[in-house]
Amino acid sequence: AQSVTQLDSQVPVFEEAPVELRCNYSSSVSVYLFWYVQYPNQGLQLLLKYLSGSTLVKGINGFEAEFNKSQTSFHLRKPSVHISDTAEYFCAVTAYSGAGSYQLTFGKGTKLSVIP
Amino acid sequence: KAGVTQTPRYLIKTRGQQVTLSCSPISGHRSVSWYQQTPGQGLQFLFEYFSETQRNKGNFPGRFSGRQFSNSRSEMNVSTLELGDSALYLCASSLTGGRMNTEAFFGQGTRLTVV
């Protein structure tokens, strides 16, 4: 079974400052890693994903994440945040669950608040 | 192309009642997954349907059930509602839900309140 830990439940940051949202995972098998964003009263939107290859992954809205297998981490970064980045961010992993199914397991989420 | 559509968006039910939620996936997508989101437990996987068959199931009681139709639309049903069932229920669709589940598109969710 796999699990995901998002180390910070809330992260306040000033506008135009850099931000890092931390994510660690555990799994006994190979996993694929994702970051999703959720705006108030909305569903989840995929920001970026790591499947294989380059460990630095670039996503939408200027976000990027780095896969570190030795530290089992997949931290999300943005060099300069905007007010519009205020949202909740979820790290997720997926691994084979049998019968052709790959189940997403989510972290508890990190609420990013961008301060003007 | 149209996204994932969940209906209704909001629902208020009384304890002990049952409820049915609907999810229409993106055209051509055959896999539909359901998740429950609560402040305390976060996002938890309920079940996945693929080609009208339940392919995977999370750790929820039998009161939670679902089905998928031949057009890939899915419904989930919760019987004998409890206060703790109050949550945002999210549906996600993908082409096959297969190897990488890389393109799981989420609907806006149904906010269920049990009183």
Image: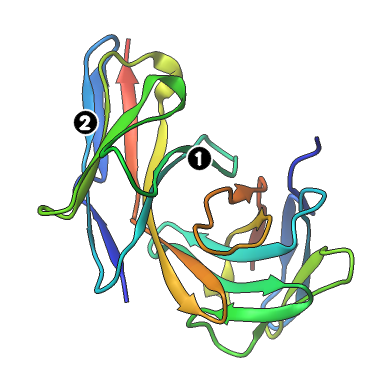
Is tag 1's residue or tag 2's residue first in the polypeptide sequence? 2
B36 displayed left or right of B29: left
Q: Label 2's element?
A: strand
| In the rendered image, the vertical position of residue B3 relative to residue B111, given as above or below | above
- Residue A63, percent across and down? 36, 26
Q: Nearer the viewer, residue B92 or B59?
A: B92
Measured as percent of width and height from the top left, residue A91 is found at 35, 49
- Horizontally, is A31 left or right of B29 in the view? left
**Quarter of the figure that contains the N terminus of chain B:** top right
Residue B66 seen anywhere in this rendered image of the structure:
no
Q: CA distance from mark 1 to mark 2?
A: 17 Å
Number of numbered discs: 2
- Of tags 1 and 2, the one toward the viewer is 1
Quadrant of the image occupied by residue B94: bottom right
- The answer to whether residue A68 is above or below residue A17 is below
Residue under pointer 2: A20
Q: Residue at x 31, y 70 (%)?
A: A2
Chain containing mark 2: A
Residue A46, numbered circle = 1
Residue B4 vertical position relative to residue B52 in the rendered view, above or below = above
Comparing B5 with A32, the one in front is A32
Farthest-out residue, left: A70
Disc 1 marks a residue whose amino acid type is Leu
Across and down, in percent, residue A106 comes to: 39, 58
For the residue marked with disc 2, what is the amino acid? Glu
Q: Residue at x 28, y 9 (%)?
A: A16
- Is B112 on the left or on the right of B35, as rendered? right
For residue A16, above or below residue A34: above
